[in-house]
Image (cartoon, coloured by chain):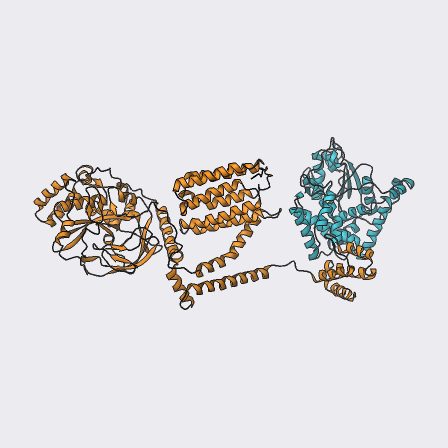
Amino acid sequence: MQQRSALEPLPVSKDAQRVVIEQARKALGGIILGKNQQITLALACLLARGHLLIEDLPGLGKTMLAQALSRVLGLSFQRIQFTSDLLPADIIGVSVFRQDSSEFEFQPGPVFSQLILADEVNRATPKAQSALLEAMEEQQVSVDGTTRQLPDPFFVVATQNPGDQIGTFPLPESQLDRFLMRVELGYPNEESERELLGGEDRRSMMKEIVPVTGPDMLIALQQSAREVHVSDALIDYIQALVRHTRESADIEIGLSPRGAQALVAAAKALAFIEGHSGAYPDDVQAVFSAIAGHRLKPAGGTRFRSPAELCHHVLDSVAIP
Amino acid sequence: MNARPRGTDGSLLTSLPWTIGALALSVAPHLPYLPVWVTAAFIGCSAWRYVIEKRRRALPSVWLRAGLALACFLGVLATYATISGVGPGSALLAVMASLKLVETRKRRDQFVLLFISIFLVMSALLREQYVWSLPYLLVAVFVIMTAWLRMSATPGETAKQSFSTGGRLLLYAAPVAVAMWIFFPRIAIPFWAVPMDTGTATSGISDSMSPGDVSSLSMSNAVAFRVTFDGAIPEPRELYWRGLVLTVFNGRSWSLNDPYKGPRVHEKVSVQAEPISYEITLEPTRQPWIFALDMPWSWTLERTFMGPQHQLVRALPVDQRVAYQAVSYPQFETNVELTESARDWYQRIPDASNPETRAFAREMRAAAGSDRAYIEAILQKFHEEEYFYTLQPPPLGSNSVDRFLFDTRQGFCEHYASAFAVLMRAAEIPARIVLGYHGGEMNPMAGHMTVRQSDAHAWNEVWLDGHGWFRIDPTAAVAPDRIDYGVSEAAFEGLGAAWGLSAPSKLVHNMTLAVDALNAKWNEWVLGYGPENQNKFMQWLGMRDPSWRKMILTMIAIVFSLIAVISILLALRYRAPAKDPAAILFQRFAKKTGLEQEVGETPARFADRARLANSLPAPVIDSVTEAYHEARYGPAGPAAFVRLKNTVNAIS
């Protein structure tokens, strides 16, 4: 934390930052077709210094999105395939004894990367899961009594396979809360799918991606996203939403204060991406489902089939003050 | 009547415990006075109803309910033989409320129950009006209020919220209640006099004395009266509170004069030394006796007269607490000749009763030589022989004095007074018994003296030729400490244990004193606020010749202005979600588009819709939306607001 504040933000104007963001969006949109909304949310999540959980069926481009993000943003990338025999050391790293120097040397694990794809995170045991989740929370790991700082920016994209029930360990609510956002990708529309089928191979395209920015710039962007203006009127709106989730008979567990903070941070990041002068109600509404979907617990026997539906219902029932 | 009992759906499960609780609080002050089966009925019905709701059973059929109602009505009738009065009335109300619980199906029924609760809790004031009645009442009303709010609570409302709302509402009502209490006219004629239950045990001295009477009083800690002395407090040995005078002995018990037979000539009194002036607040006794320090000289209580034996008698029984000032002379003489008939009257004892005592008395009198010597000898006998002062004496037979004097030799004031009077009369010395109180305890916290039922006392007056009636307290000869210290202090001196009194701890004693002080102030300031005090207070407030009309009008005026002031204060305090000026402008714009903004629709999405609706040119819509966003959500609010204002105003 100390180090970061010592870093001087790059002397880049807000306009230049916006150009970078537009470029990044464009580059990502060229690879992941027809998923502009999810790409924007993923970027917002990154700018809000949160972690992302993508929940969807296999083959919908979860891995592709994570990889593309690292490429476009110029971040070091590691992929950890979570399996039931994955050990915490496989994530964090191990100390190896060196014959020549007679000393232990730490071999950093894949977690020491700027962008980590934790693939199928619910297939690993809770022990392995919590090793990652702790690293996410603290942005540091402790091995053999030594605390090691993880790189900055540090962004975890975890994927979860919802259909898979056998042999999985679904993340409990408390762990889900560590992810700022949860998004679903969904099938591409017909047009995008046609382009995908007829067009170039995505993997070779990926190799050709030129990064539009680097880690330092990303930190500056994150700083700018934090500085987005939040008016009292918007806080009123967020409070009204949060209050509704707590008081509604349809919802058993409403948004916590941390959830409300997440909503503000995400709305600010999105407003920055969209170039709004401050966080608008539209920004709040756009991120609401991704923020609240995995944090709300619907009451038993309600009519809502999915968290997204419940979130839309909340948005439709709360007047914007 | 053809309504089929329907199953309950558990929808009352949240509000029902509150209703039951409110009802329990309002029934509770009555229950100790009511037959046990009323308590059983209440608890039974509450549990029954709760289980019905919990298990979603059906309510009992109308026939069962009607049968129960009839049974309860007959039960009340059988217990009291009437249905009017506080006892039967509250019993009926309590059982019917319990039964109403069993047919409570909807919110409306619960409202009815809460109304009954309010009524019950208020009617508890007909029974007792102690200091603690007020806080209890407030708590009960608070709970009833909360139960009310619980019933009409919105789904998300917590019990805590209802509680604080209820508290706030009561707080707003408090000034209005105080104003009404002060100004509601107290009318001297008790046309709404409380119908007191007849036959309920009255505490206090009764108009006859048979062995064991005062004993039950000695165990009672109830306050008889409170005294505030104007000057110095007299010595304990002077504190003889004269009550009534018993002159007729039937061999076992003593009673009053038959007013048509007994001596009716007023005895002249001459007084000496300094008078004592004081004020007495007498608790209701439902008896006509008025107590005052021996010898009463003047008093301020209306319709109160002095009887032939210097006893104060009121024309009406003391049904309510009364306060009066009195002046007494502790040193006095009644030096007038006794008429033959009166002398005869004060010497009468039934011929057949107590033969041993009479024989003994004649013997002693003959041996003593003079009346004074005889009296001395008798007191000496009590003092020196084995006579014991105890509050738990063995029972005596029909020749009570014989048995007491020569057999049991244990007793307290009334035994000694009775025996002494009989011994006197047997020796042809006129004697009588005075019933009253002796002593009293100063309450240092309040500055008054409290005389309790346990201070009840009986002593003698004997006629000595040339001297008049002379007070003799034979108890003093047996247990001088009883007279020197009084009962409550004796309990501390360790003497009480010998008499069968349990010594209270110092802490308990101090608490008793504090409660006593509080009660005295309560009586004085709250319960004592009757017609007289109200009149004084009104005049002090500046009302000329207060009449009930003026008071009612003042009350109405004050209550309405209070309501107005409270409403205005609340209105001022209420922060309406201040409508942002920018939001108002946007609403004006929205109106001009001819569309209505939906709940949860952002300005941007509304603008999209407006653009499609085409009622306003798209550039206008864009610039309004942009300016509105800037003004409300952007960092440059004021400048953007001017832009917004101009744009909206420019729309024709």
Relative to A160, A200 lies left or right: right
Let me know if residue B397 appears in the view.
Answer: yes
Relative to B314, B57 lies left or right: right
Q: Colour of chain B?
A: orange
Residue drawn at (44%, 49%), measured in percent from left and top? B123
Residue drawn at (47%, 49%), measured in percent from left and top? B119
Q: Nearer the viewer, residue B120 or B70?
A: B70
Q: Position of residue B333 (x, y in %)?
A: 17, 57
Q: Nearer the viewer, residue A253 or A78?
A: A253
Q: Position of residue B300 (x, y in %)?
A: 29, 60
Relative to A214, A200 lies left or right: right
Let me know if residue B495 appears in the view.
Answer: no
Q: Colour of chain A?
A: cyan
Q: Nearer the viewer, residue A79 or B501?
A: B501
Q: Position of residue B35 (x, y in %)?
A: 41, 40
Q: Nearer the viewer, residue B496 or B542?
A: B542
